[in-house]
Each structure stands twice: as C-alpha cells, then as structure tokens.
Amino acid sequence: MNQAAVNGFDVQDEGLVHAHIIPHSHCDPGWLDTFEGYYQDSVERILSAVTAMLQEDKSRRFVWSEISFFSKYAFSYCQFVRSSAQ
C-alpha cells in the first residue's frame, strides 16, 4: 500500500494528493482593540464578504471560531433582513 494512503491522504493513480483547504479567520475579542472597535473595523467587513462568497457558491465552507463576534453579526444581519423585508 502507498505510504501516503497509509497516512490518510487520498492518492490517485497519478500519485496526486487531494488537499482540502478550508479558509478560516481568527479575531480575538478585545486583544488589539475593544470588542466594538474590532467588530466595526474588521469583523463586520470579514463576515459580510464571507457571507456574500458563501451565497455565490453553496459548496464553499468557512470556519469562524469567535462566537461572540458571530453572534453580534448574526443578530445585526437578521435585523437588516427583517427591516428590508418590510
């Protein structure tokens, strides 16, 4: 058996390895700026761009670990959707 297959890699007959790359972002609340400052200066823009890209292609994935930022964004986004639907 091929050593790469033993190590858990998917190897085709040509010897190519299939790598799955999942983009992610890491923003520590309160580390470089206040929570609100960091959200307004960086996080909101990142999540808005990622949301648009994910809507364009349903096969895309994104990992976000800071639930406090995501919660604020999701609540704001839901408020926006509700107000624009009226």
Image (cartoon, grey):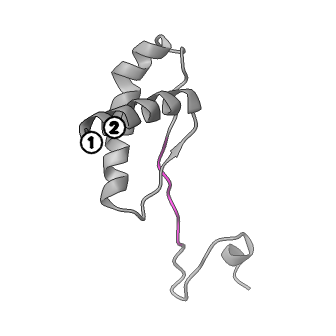
Question: In the image, what residue occupies the spot 52% across and 31% down?
Answer: 71
Q: Name the kind of residue labelled 2 in the image.
A: Arg
Are the residues tagged 1 and 2 within 8 Å (C-beta)? yes
The answer to which image quadrant residue 47 occupies is top left
Prevailing SS of the magenta stretch? loop
**Of 20 and 17, the residue lying toward us:** 20
| Residue of label 2 | 82
Q: Position of residue 37 (x, y in %)?
A: 40, 13
**Where does the C terminus fall, quadrant-wise?**
top left
Would you say residue 75 sits in the magenta stretch? no
As drawn, is 14 to the left or to the right of 53?
Answer: right
Q: In the orientation shown, which residue stands out farthest toward the bottom?
A: 13
Q: Secondary structure at mark 2?
A: helix
| Residue of label 1 | 85
Q: Name the kind of residue labelled 1 in the image.
A: Ala
Q: Position of residue 7 (x, y in %)?
A: 72, 69
Q: Position of residue 8 (x, y in %)?
A: 70, 70
**Position above or below: 82 against 56:** above
**Where does the N terminus fall, quadrant-wise?**
bottom right
**Position above or below: 86 against 60:** above
**Of 28 and 19, the residue lying toward us:** 28
Would you say residue 23 sits in the magenta stretch? yes
Q: Secondary structure at mark 1?
A: helix
Categorize mark 1 by other alpha carbons within 10 Å: few (<14), some (14-19), many (20+). Answer: few
Give the magenta-colored segment's residue range.
18-24
